[in-house]
Amino acid sequence: MFAAVARALLLASSRNASLNRFALTHGGRLGARRFVAGESLDAFVPVVRELNAAGFTVASGILGEGVSTEAETEAVCAEYRTLLDRIADERLGANVALKLTHLGLAIDEGLALRNVRGLVEYAAERGIFVRMDMEESACVEPTLHIYRTMRSIGVDNTGVVLQAYLYRAMGDLEALLAVRPNVRLVKGAYLESAAVAFPRKRDVDRNYKALIERALAADGFTAIATHDEDAIRHTIEFARSHGIAARGRFEFQMLYGVRPALQRRLIAEEYPVRVAAPFGGSWFPYFMRRLAERPANVAFILGSMLRR
């Protein structure tokens, strides 16, 4: 009951015009912008340069998700082409992560496929990788179908995401292994029912480690996206014991502004770390929606503001 009420309040906040104006004025002082790498592409580029100089690569993304018209998706695609050009022209150590709902998945799967294929092929001409993020459980099947379609027609500079809290995740991974996927493994943050997702954290944690082991034992590339030090050390020990070199086989991924000291420590230990750094003017709705996906994230984010 509490989670449902908290989620409703956070979603309402994301749509409140007064709160949006307040956030734009005071958000930096309150600390929320620590998790967003600028409100424009011009602001974002220096952040990437600073991260690259410190040894990190970056997963860039333009803030925004659902769209309601095909024209809106065309505008989003234009923004992403501009981002891809900038990454290539300035030789930034960055790839792109995008959400298919931002490209029209909720309107029509075929529209999303055409849009993402166009962007991934555009990125390939510039030597840039594009990952399709995973969203709510209802989006899993169409997202995986689009990924499999892309790979079947020879579009290889793209990857997908699997969420460990979903019961289906291990089966989905097994089904993908034949194409040597580039897969990012996350625990999952959306508010899902017990019909499709493990309700207990310990079960999610156990499944997450199992997915890491299965992915690393197979071919392909694995991005382990977590701030959980236990899962990170488990990955390191498993890789060592099985002779799996980090470079070229896996990397750790973490959110911009979250656990920066841990990120630096992994770099010092010579493990590749990619920082997920979204940018854009709609950062406040994004921030509220991320909290609404799982109200427990509120405590995590507040703790991250205090923990280095």
Image (cartoon, helix red, strand yellow):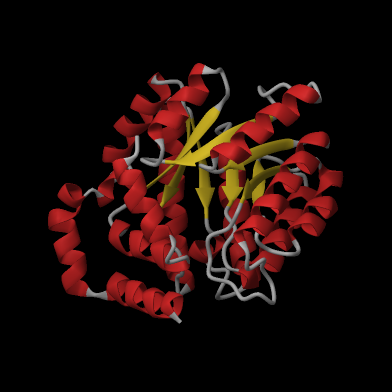
290 or 159, nearer to the observer? 290
Residue 300: x, y in percent? Answer: 40, 53
Q: Is residue 92 above or below residue 12?
A: above
Q: Is residue 3 above or below residue 171?
A: below
Q: Is residue 146 above or below residue 81?
A: below
102 or 273, nearer to the observer? 273
Residue drawn at the location 37% of the way across and 57% of the way down:
299
- Please identify the quadrant where the C terminus is shown: top left
- Say whether residue 39 is visible: no
Residue 113: x, y in percent? Answer: 64, 61
175 or 99, nearer to the observer? 175
Residue drawn at the location 30% of the way across and 59% of the way down:
282
145 sits to left or right of 46: right
180 sits to left or right of 106: right
Residue 238 quadrant: top right
240 or 77, nearer to the observer? 240
Residue drawn at the location 31% of the way across and 56% of the way down:
283
Number of numbered discs overlaid on the protein picture: 0
